[in-house]
Amino acid sequence: MAEAVVSIVVARLTDLLIEEPVALHGLKDEIQQVVTKLELMKTFLQDADSRISEYQVRTLVADIRALAYDAEHVVETFIVKASSSAWNRRNQAIKIKDIESKMSLLSDRIRENNIKSTSESSNSSSEAPGKLKRFHSFKTLEPEIFVGFHGDVDRLVGHLMNESDDCYPLISICGMGGLGKTTLAQKIYNHPTIKASFAGLAWVSISQKWQTKLVLQRILICLIHEKKEEILTWDDDNSNVEVAVHVNREGVIYQPECLNAEQSWELLKLKALPRGDHLDSRDTFTVMEKMGREMVKKCAGLPLAIVILGGILVTKPSVMEWEKVYADSLWSLQKGKGLGEDQQRELFHVLVWSYNDLPPQLKPCFLYLGKFGEDKMIEVETLYQLWIAEGIVLSTDKREGETMMQVAESYMGELVHRSMVQVTFQEVESSPTKIKYSFLHDLMRDLSLSQ
């Protein structure tokens, strides 16, 4: 996170140097030196963030983050009080010198902790300095990826359509997080046979903190959408509506199995190589396949882990970059795990790895989503405005003619491309933003909160 903070401060100070040349007269050179030193310090922070579990590194990172904020505060205070007196200029100049001295001490601590600098020559998107390298395009929607459960969908739809029972069956889909339970349920819910056979359909997410009234309101709104406003005004006492719940003791309890090795590779390939026919050669694909099959073994057959791993690899188009990810996987994932209770731990390793691989601009944007409630559908237009107001959308990432809202949407597009955030799209072509709502998988929200 320190890498993200320093990136934001560097961008902010760079903007001020361009936008406020008169106000900063007399301290411009000193501020530029601070920016230069922060940029140099930033090259060490990716390694530092990956070692955040070490106490000395954690305190060092916290001090770097605090110093970056101090630098921003001093410069902004100077601008506000620039016209007050010559004494103020001298006072702020002393503070900037003090910040430079502290930066030198922090640089010594970086060396003492053997923290490595990111190679400026690396092609990895997460290591590229400056502007965000974009991989996502809104010209085409993210491809739908569904592997290994087609037969299960047909079988469970068959249970729902079985007319031999006098009542509709209850189907419970059970299993650990990341197994694909929600995806499977969505496939059944949206199945054309189901839509054609049932007079009403309702989809409701129930979080750990839920209220009966709200759940029933959501169900009724799905079934009687034209009475939405009326339903929302109902209270617990004056409704003539009685809801009867009948649980069929003979209902189906379905537990999805993990993907096998071939299915795991197929899912990874679809996510990581969506345009596989554009690879340089068949030999390139063969090398990537060999590494991909080895890496996907560590995902223990969990669809979420495989898709997240694919989200890392999809931003690495060359064999050299895949080789680096493969080497990193030996450290990021525990070799030989993936059975029983170790699956959840293995999945969390993949999720943390995906966060660490994010470009610094995207880390605070992802973490910001954790402040919203569980299963919360977040309206992206409001979210983008909040990102911009918080200063985590960088003007340095603007392309010619772009607004800050469009830059914010490009950030969301990259998070979606990496499968870290889920979204629903606008149905209206003329809408100012293409995405309507965003939301986090429960485990991705847990990751956001843990970070």
Image (cartoon, rainbow, N blue to C red):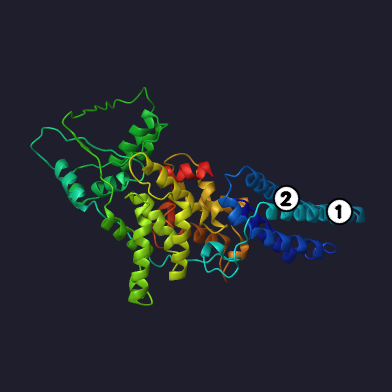
| Amino acid type indicated by mark 1 | Ile
Q: Position of 447 compared to 115: left or right?
A: left
What SS does tag 2 mark?
Answer: helix
Let me know if residue 255 appears in the view: yes
Q: Which numbered disc covers residue 269?
A: none
Which residue, as the protein is rendered here, is positioned at the far front? Answer: 336
- Location of residue 9 in the rendering, given as x and y in whole percent from the top left corner: 68, 56
Q: Which mark is residue 67?
A: 2
Query: Element at badge 1?
Result: helix
Q: In which quadrant of the rendered view does residue 434 lie?
A: bottom left
For image coordinates 70% across by 59% down, the residue present is 38
Question: In the image, residue 240 lies at what x, y percent?
Answer: 29, 25
The mark found on residue 94 in the picture is 1
- Crowding around mark 2 (Cα neighbors within 10 Å: few <14, some 14 to 19, many 20+) is some
In this rendered view, identify the residue nearer to me: 367 or 37: 37
Q: How many marks?
A: 2
Q: Residue furthest left?
A: 164
- x then y, percent, for residue 329: 45, 56
- Quarter-of-image position of residue 442: top left
For this view, does 419 lie left or right of residue 358?
left
Q: Earlier in the sequence, mark 1 or mark 2?
A: 2
Q: Amino acid at mark 2?
A: Leu
- The residue at the point 69 percent across, 55 percent down is 111
Q: Position of residue 337 (x, y in %)?
A: 38, 46
